[in-house]
Amino acid sequence: MTTASTGAALPLAHVLPTTAEVNAAGRLSVGGCDVRELADRFGTPLYIYDTATLRAQLRGYREAFTAAYPDSELVYASKAFLNRPFARFIASEGFGFDAVSAGEIATLKSADVDLGRVYLHGNNKTPDELRYAVENGVGRIVIDGEWEIELLERIAGELGRTQRVLVRVSPGIDGHTHEKTTTGILDSKFGLPIVTGAAERAIRAIVAAPHLEFRGIHMHLGSPIFEMEPYGQAIEVMAEFIDEVVRKQIGVEVPEFSPGGGFAVAYWGEQQAPAYAEYAAVIASTLQREGDARGFELPHITLEPGRSIVARAGLAVYTVGARKEVPGIRTYVSVDGGMADNPRVALYDSKYEAVLPDRPLDPPEELVTIAGKYCESGDILVKDIELPRLRAGELLAMPAAGAYQVAMESNYNLALRPAVVMVENGTARLIRRRQTFEDLGALDVDE
Ligand SMILES: *Cc1c(COP(=O)(O)O)cnc(C)c1O
């Protein structure tokens, strides 16, 4: 499937996978694979992940943080997208994992990932999840509430284990992102606030619990965070808490600290995301400054990028179908996917671009709205976009589709979940087949 590049400059190159180019046939190729050929072979909707883009993101993060703060570790936030082959790929690049459910841990386990490098998060981990995590040797459980401490202490005691834990502290800082994805403010279901005394009480309870080992503090501001100031401000708040409360009042050291994830990516034309080095610089310099001023040893830090590892690597590919013109109001063009594979637009009004893989260089001709095929008026993928006049049967691709799309998919309308392929050097590897009608009925119990 390898195709020569024409070298033509692609519009929207900064939101497409790094290997995206126009091939000799004048079509879009990714990872050396012609997108039209992939669509014919695997069907649409199709999710394509470009291996080179993923690898560059993974290595870019590691290099940027190692340079800025040598005692740093990178873990991939699994909830952005995970399955077994994908977990193996991420692990092969030296990343650990963030998990938020027993299902994610089970998937990582089935991929033979080192569970000692897994961090378990969640504001309401169930007793079964906590037991599963402890039994399987999950490296850190990130305590997110006071109830969890008693529960985990009892479970670890019953299993005769000592569980290492971090405490998720809410810094009370607004990351200036969508209200549904901000997590560091006081009015949030996540984290133990400092100002109410809950964070201090939690750490005291952990220190007193014989089967829990306090290792440090975690924070996560939400996602995506485009500004540097919230990280700087939140780390200052954390440093003060670590120094004044944890070290001086409770009397324990804090060997580990996680500033979380939430690093931004560009989804559309004029949108720009900060470079990894900018996040690394603000995190490292704030910690170094606070550590120097307060005289504490710098902690081991863990970064948890999810979206920014996978979003740009992913391309969602659909087939164009129906067209409906409402004169003077709007023209709807529908594709064969929508909110079942990408609920982000309906959830957060997320904005996307679209490109036409069959003729990526054609100039725009009209303003349209790209609709999905599902039975909700809110099933829109792109509102108001200038595109060439779309023809039924041609392909439409949406860039920056790698994060929180397949991961949030549903079988709404009993839609079949799409196939997922990874592409590199002209070869496509199917890492998840498309669902079948048999899969739809697989859980049904007839008698
Ligand atoms: C979701 C989440 C992340 C990852 O966020 P991204 O925007 O995907 O980078 C990291 N840490 C925690 C605790 C999370 O809940």
Image (tube, grey):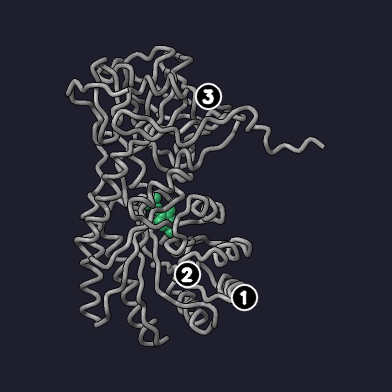
Graded by Cα atoms within 10 Å as few (under 14), some (14 to 19) or many (20 or more), the crowding at tag 1 reads: some
For residue 269, the mark is none
Label 1 secondary element: helix
* Residue 168 appears anywhere in the view: yes
Graded by Cα atoms within 10 Å as few (under 14), some (14 to 19) or many (20 or more), the crowding at tag 3 reads: many
Observer-nearest residue: 416 or 439? 439
Label whose residue precedes the other's in the sequence (3 or 2): 2
- State which quadrant residue 281 falls in: bottom left
Where residue 396 appears, as percent x and y from the top left, is 38, 22
Query: Which quadrant of the picture is home to ligand 1?
Result: bottom left
The residue depicted at 64 percent of the width and 75 percent of the height is: 158
Q: What's under tag 2, amino acid-wise?
A: Leu
The residue depicted at 46 percent of the width and 22 percent of the height is: 335
Q: Which residue is mark 2?
A: 192
The residue depicted at 46 percent of the width and 66 percent of the height is: 139
Label 2 secondary element: strand
Q: Which residue is mark 3?
A: 373
For residue 154, the mark is 1
Label 3 secondary element: loop
Give me the C-alpha separation between circle 3 and circle 1.
49 Å
Observer-nearest residue: 14 or 183? 14
Q: Are marks 3 and 2 in contact (CB under 8 Å)?
A: no
Judge whether 310 appears above or below 256 on screen. above
Give me the C-alpha separation between circle 3 and circle 2.
42 Å
Image quarter hosting the N terminus: top left
Mark 2 or 1, closer to the camera: 1
Graded by Cα atoms within 10 Å as few (under 14), some (14 to 19) or many (20 or more), the crowding at tag 2 reads: many
* Residue 182 appears anywhere in the view: no
Q: Are marks 2 and 1 in contact (CB under 8 Å)?
A: no
Mark 3 or 1, closer to the camera: 1
Q: Are marks 3 and 1 in contact (CB under 8 Å)?
A: no
